[in-house]
Image: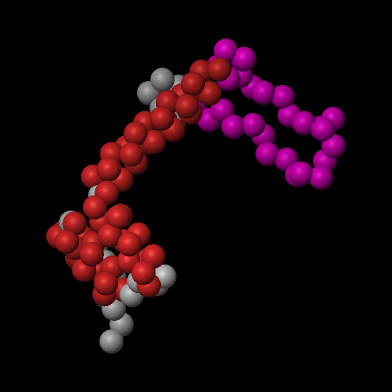
Amino acid sequence: MSDRLDLVNYERERRPMFLPNTFSAHKTYSEEKAAQIDEEISSIFEEAHKRVGKVLSKRQKVLDDLAHLLLEKEVGQGEELREMLSKSNPGIAALLPEQPS
């Protein structure tokens, strides 16, 4: 599903793995369409990769602090992680699960 390929399902027919290849289903779309699908998938992955890179760069300090904590202790307790994350993003504290009492 994309703007370029519309809301169409290009998935191949599913079949049991144990059947021989002679029973394999043929594609219901052309090689040109297959190339478009490949390009669109690459574009989606590229966009996601850039977005993840931005998020990680923005949170670099907290990731470094977390790595340092794990190198020292090997295990981080819930409260330590909550405190560390809430310093980098104060709004995240409300999203984190409460520690059981």
Q: Is residue 20 left or right of residue 43?
A: right
Is residue 18 covered in magenta?
Answer: yes
Query: Which image quarter: residue 24?
Result: top right
Dominant secondary-structure state across the stretch colored magenta: loop
Query: Which image quarter: residue 68?
Result: bottom left
Q: Is residue 48 left or right of residue 18?
A: left
Residue 62 visible in the picture: yes
At horizontal 31% and vertical 73% (from top left) the residue drawn is 78
> Does residue 48 lie above or below 27 as drawn?
below
At horizontal 67% and vertical 23% (from top left) the residue drawn is 27
Query: Which image quarter: residue 11?
Result: top right
Residue 6 visible in the picture: no
Q: Is residue 83 left or right of residue 26?
A: left
> Does residue 76 lie above or below 43 as drawn?
below
Residue 56: give x, y in percent of width and height. Answer: 30, 45
Q: Is residue 22 left or right of residue 55?
A: right
What range of the chain is rendered magenta? 7-34
At horizontal 61% and vertical 19% (from top left) the residue drawn is 29
Residue 1: give x, y in percent of width and height. Answer: 44, 30
At horizontal 52% and vertical 23% (from top left) the residue drawn is 37
Residue 53: give x, y in percent of width and height. Answer: 33, 39
Residue placed most toward the observer, 49 or 41:
49
> Does residue 31 lie above or below 49 as drawn?
above
The residue at the far bottom in this view is 101
The residue at the far front in this view is 72
Residue 8: give x, y in percent of width and height. Answer: 49, 27
